[in-house]
Amino acid sequence: MLVTKVTVKLHRGLQARNTALFVDKACSFTSDVILSKSGISSDGKKLMRVMDLNVKDGDEIMLMVNGCDEHVTFDTLKSFLLDE
């Protein structure tokens, strides 16, 4: 399992469009993806669950990835959240 804290650097954070893009990327991998903010965890492959976290630009979240392709999943999603 790979875990890191990420300070989101997306304009408008994980709001509608960015959340859809994030979930689409997460679903393209087999690893489990969990996002956590303020002690609340959500499945990173479920659009409404990610939107429920109300992640804004500058918020610190925890990204957790576990599975057979966790390294590539982790790197891809982390880069997306950091707008790289």
Image (cartoon, rainbow, N blue to C red):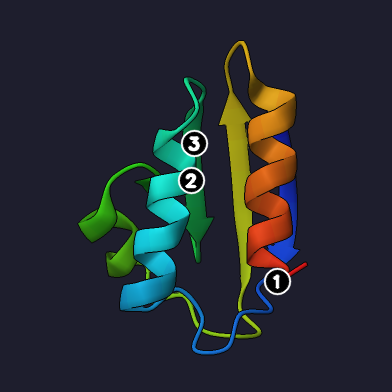
Q: What residue is shown with label 3?
A: 33
Residue drawn at x 72%, y 62% is 6
Q: Earlier in the sequence, mark 2 or mark 3?
A: 2
Residue 59: x %, y % from top left:
61, 79
Quadrant for residue 14, please give it.
bottom left
**84 in relation to 30, above or below:** below
Q: Which residue is mark 1?
A: 83
Q: CA distance from mark 1 to mark 2?
A: 14 Å
Disc 2 is placed on an element classified as helix
Mark 1 residue element? loop
Q: CA distance from mark 1 to mark 3?
A: 18 Å
Tell me which numbered mark, 1 or 2, is placed earlier along the sequence: 2
- Check whether the beta carbons of the residues at disc 2 and disc 3 lie within 8 A of each other: no
Q: Which residue is mark 2?
A: 25
**From the image, which quarter does the N terminus lie in?**
top right
Q: Is residue 37 visible?
A: yes
